Image (spheres, grey):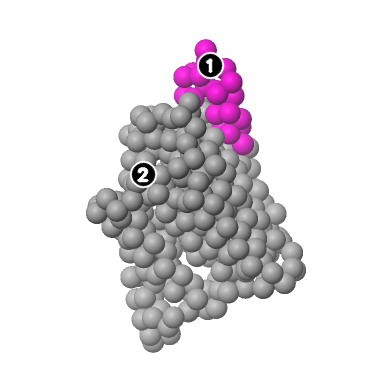
Amino acid sequence: MFELQFAAANTAGIASILAFWIFIGSAALRRLQQTMLKLGMLTLAVAFIAMTAAIVARGIASGRFPLSNLYESLLWFAWSTAGGFLCLGKLYPIRQLGWLASLSIATVFLYGSWLPASQHDMSPLAPALVSYWRQIHVPPLIASYALFLLSGLASLAALWAQGAKLSVAGAAGALAMAIIAIGLGTYTNINTAVLQGVFVGGSLVGLTASWLNLRQIQSCAVDEKASDLYDEVAQRAVLIGLPLLTVGIITGALWANHAWGSYWSWDPKESMALVTWLSYATYIHLRIKRFCTTGQLSVVAVAAMILTLLTYLGFSALGLAGLHSYGRIK
């Protein structure tokens, strides 16, 4: 069964990379664009099915719910991202967003494949994880993180469709610095204070530049219809993800009380989950009250996505996880 899980995971990783190149190719081959977009969605669906098989096989082989370490968490995250994109793709014509979604999934697979063997092994659970609360608390959180990722990617696409290419560059730079800091924190022994500075400094500089350059519009690149579409997709992903995050936080508090006798201990990752929740609640508030333009809301969504990455992976990789340190590999 372990061999089946390994083969299914590899198939999913290869399919996600193939989907990325198909989506990229659809932009170059205009005459075959619609056919290639459909093929890209089909390939991503194959990746989703393979990930489903990998998760089920891993659960059978380990004799437990397969969500207990960083590798398994990443597998669920990639599965949720693919599933979320395929569902949104049924509701909206967002196949052009496929290259960003498939690239994200492929990156998650690469990140997971480079983890040490101890993370891939089906080892016994840590005592604190031996609880029925694990399968109640963690899946909603992972699903919400995946939807928030899709919201951030759709917001980048909305900025691009608005012609705010300098803002896209700033937001993409902020995201890149955050990912680099997390990657270095996971695989190297660089001082965590330096990595925290890279994460925070790079994110703040990039997001500030993105915000300040919102008025720098390339009129020839404006596509208001696409901008409205991706903005709506970003909103829909948040509206689905925020209740899931709420469920995850509430069940986490119940689990904490069951395990440690306290509903809330202000552990760093607990606190960051609350900050993430507040960031998306702010996003929804700003949208309802119409305090911000579409471009400003897109930058807020990207900022919230970076906070989500910090909550999910950053706190462990950057040495700030506290009690929630099960995913740290050093």
Cβ atoms under marks 2 and 1 closer than 8 Å: no
* In the rendered image, the vertical position of residue 303 relative to residue 272, given as above or below: above
Pick whichever, 128 or 184, lies toward us: 184
Image position, residue 142 (x, y; %)? 45, 57
Pick whichever, 61 or 168, lies toward us: 168
Q: Which residue lies furthest to the left in this view?
A: 289
Q: Is mark 2 on a helix, strand or loop?
A: helix
Neighbour class for label 1 at 10 Å: few (<14), some, many (≥20)? few
* C-alpha separation, residue under disc 2 versus residue under disc 1: 29 Å
Image position, residue 125 (x, y; %)? 55, 71
The amino acid type, in three-letter code, at marker 1 is Arg
Residue 253 falls left or right of residue 211: left
* In the rendered image, the vertical position of residue 84 relative to residue 227, given as above or below: below
Q: Residue at x 53, y 16 (%)?
A: 30
Q: Which residue lies furthest to the top in this view?
A: 31
Q: Name the residue under label 1.
A: 30
**Span colored in magenta:** 17-38
Q: Can residue 141 be seen in this view?
A: yes
Q: Is residue 59 visible?
A: no
Q: Residue furthest bottom?
A: 261
The amino acid type, in three-letter code, at marker 2 is Thr
Q: Mark 2 points at which residue?
A: 294
SS majority, magenta: helix
> Would you say residue 295 sits in the magenta stretch?
no
Q: Which residue is drawn at 46% across and 45% down?
A: 214
Q: Quick one: quadrant of the C terminus?
A: bottom right
Pick whichever, 271 or 87, lies toward us: 271
Closer to the camera: disc 2 or disc 1?
A: 2
* In the rendered image, the vertical position of residue 26 relative to residue 136, given as above or below: above
Q: Which residue is drawn at 64% across and 53% down?
A: 111
